[in-house]
Image (cartoon, grey):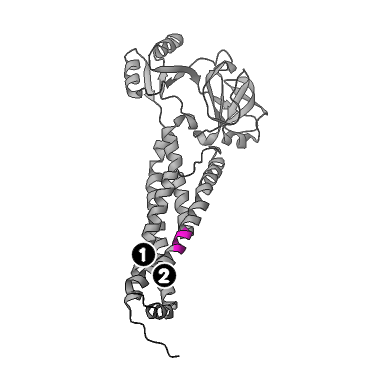
Amino acid sequence: MAIPMMMIAIGLGCWATLDDFIRHPERVGQAAALTARPGDLAADEAQRRAAADPDVAAVYPGAEPDALVPWQTRTVRTRALGRSADPYPFPVVEGRIYRDQGEAVAGQGLLDLLGVRIGDRVRMTIGGTPLIVRIVGRVVEPEHDGEVLSFGLDSLAAKDAVPQFYSIVLREGADPAEVRTRLLNVSLEVSPVVNPAERLAIIRVIIIALVVVLALIGLANLLTASALGLRDHAPDLAVLKAMGLTPRQVMATLVTGTGLLAVGGVVIGTAAGAPLAAVLIDLEGRESGVGAGIGRAPTPGMLAASVLVAVGASLLVTLIPARRAARARVPHSAR
């Protein structure tokens, strides 16, 4: 029971991590709910119209030019978003956000690609212009395998620092669909930002299937172990009946003995799997380039519900061999 429950707890940790992405998209770099493009409007006019909406909390001008990195045969994505004095609220998990021109934050994938750490300087070429930035922080970066460098728009050369889009952060409780409709009415090209967790909905189906399979494996093992254990302790049944216990009392005794072991396995497996879930998710995040700091342990409600269901199912399963053993006729052994 301990091993299936540990795996179930890890699966519930994956579920909790996806829920956290949906409820708090700012933790995966999705503080903005909408993206607006100027279209036929001038850049300053587009930003002014977006900021004029009462439900808009902040508007960050941005551009995403590709950069050529020395000693690499391909380009990497850079994200110039906000200004150094007013940076976009990236989820920094190590170091700090950029606060001055020439400072940047990077995803784990880019740090691994370039073999650099926080505090190192990186030289690259954007639009034929050299750019040297110092990496001051690591952020959770779900796009492009984490191979993204982010900095203020004012760190680019003047010819490249032209806003291509605007990331729009809404006030708490604002409806993105309503805000989008109003911005479309003022001649802005607006699209909703897709939460990366929404593209991982299939994982929830896999988690459900995994939990069901593990539960069946655990219960099948418990049923087999209970039947074999009762067969090995058949002489004890004669003693219990000789003591005057009724079949119902004998069955309760057998269920209690097996149930205590099942409860111990469930508790041990849950206690081991809950903290391990966040560790494994962060390890996978680091290896995939997204970066550590995204893993979440199962919520107390999830753990309590899984423990109660597992214990209840275990007791019901142990009733089957215990019921048969309590009603069986046990022959008297010779002295």
- The answer to which of 60 and 146 lies nearer the viewer is 60
- The answer to which of 123 and 174 lies nearer the viewer is 174
Measured from the top left, where is residue 50 in percent x and y? 40, 14
User: What type is the residue that disc 1 sits on?
Assistant: Val
> In the picture, residue 45 is in which quadrant?
top left
Q: Residue at x 43, y 69 (%)?
A: 225
Q: Is residue 183 left or right of residue 18?
A: left
Q: Is residue 119 above or below residue 305?
A: above
Q: Kindly indicate whether the residue at mark 2 contacts the one at mark 1 (C-beta within 8 angstroms).
A: yes
- How many residues crowd mark 1 within 10 Å: few (<14), some (14–19), many (20+)? some
Majority secondary structure of magenta residues: helix
Label 1's element? Answer: helix
- In the picture as drawn, the residue positioned furthest to the front comes out as 244
Whole-Å distance between the Cαs marked 1 and 2?
Answer: 9 Å
The residue wearing badge 1 is 317
Measured from the top left, where is residue 126 in percent x and y? 58, 22
The residue wearing badge 2 is 226
Q: Is residue 245 magenta?
A: no
Q: Is residue 328 above or below residue 194?
A: below
| Quadrant the N terminus occupies | bottom left
User: What type is the residue that disc 2 sits on?
Assistant: Ser
Residue range in magenta is 260-265
